[in-house]
Amino acid sequence: MKQIIQDTMRHFNITGEGFSFVDPELEDLFQTYSKPRSDYWVYVNTENKPMGGAGVGSVKGLEDDNICELQKMYVDRRFHGQGMGVALLEHCLSMAKSYGYKHIYLETVAQLSRANQLYKKYGFRQLSQALGHTGHHKCDIRMLKDL
């Protein structure tokens, strides 16, 4: 997944500090998402190679345990437009709700316009400021959805 995430971010020129491009969690997603009320799901092809993924987990630096974060939702660009993003988002929303969260937060950038349209379609509303301290201070769009 690290390769898919970083390739996508390179394509949209959203690299470097302040973006998930350099998150240390990319080195070991299994460890990162082995915490309670946290998970990461990966779409794989028939050869068991990743095609996309998304996760939910707590928001770093936020003490409100009713809010989780949609994290690292990326689909390999070769598979865009095939419904994978919709399926991943729906699964994450369902699982976040089953974990007892009341709200789901995300950080993104304007360049990811198709993803942002999807978030709006699913009821995410834009916030004027970030929640917590995720380290993604260069993200220019922050959104929240009630579950």
Image (cartoon, rainbow, N blue to C red):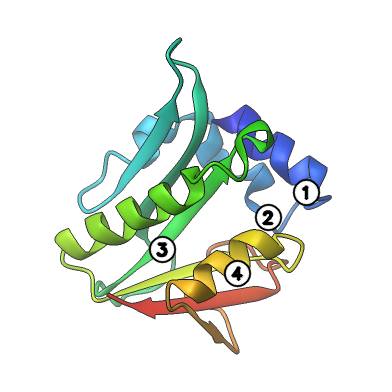
* Quarter that holds the C terminus: bottom left
Q: Using a 10 Å C-alpha cutoff, classify the residue at mark 3 as few (fewer than 14 neighbours), some (14 to 19) or many (20 or more).
A: many
Place of residue 79 in the rendered image (x, y in percent of width and height, measured from the top left)? 61, 35
Residue assigned mark 1: 16
Question: For the residues marked 1 and 4, what is the alpha-carbon distance in whole angstroms?
Answer: 24 Å
Single out the mark in the foreground, 1 or 4: 4
Q: Are marks 2 and 3 in contact (CB under 8 Å)?
A: no
Residue found at x 56% / y 44%: 74
Can residue 84 be seen?
yes
Q: Using a 10 Å C-alpha cutoff, classify the residue at mark 2 as few (fewer than 14 neighbours), some (14 to 19) or many (20 or more).
A: some
Three-letter amino acid code of the residue under disc 4: Gln
Tell me which numbered mark, 1 or 4, is placed earlier along the sequence: 1
Q: What element carries label 4?
A: helix
Question: For the residues marked 2 and 4, what is the alpha-carbon distance in whole angstroms?
Answer: 20 Å
Total numbered labels placed on residues in the image: 4
Residue assigned mark 4: 117
Residue assigned mark 2: 19
Instruction: Give the left or right position of residue 30, taking residue 115 as reference.
Output: left
Place of residue 105 in the rendered image (x, y in percent of width and height, measured from the top left)? 43, 71
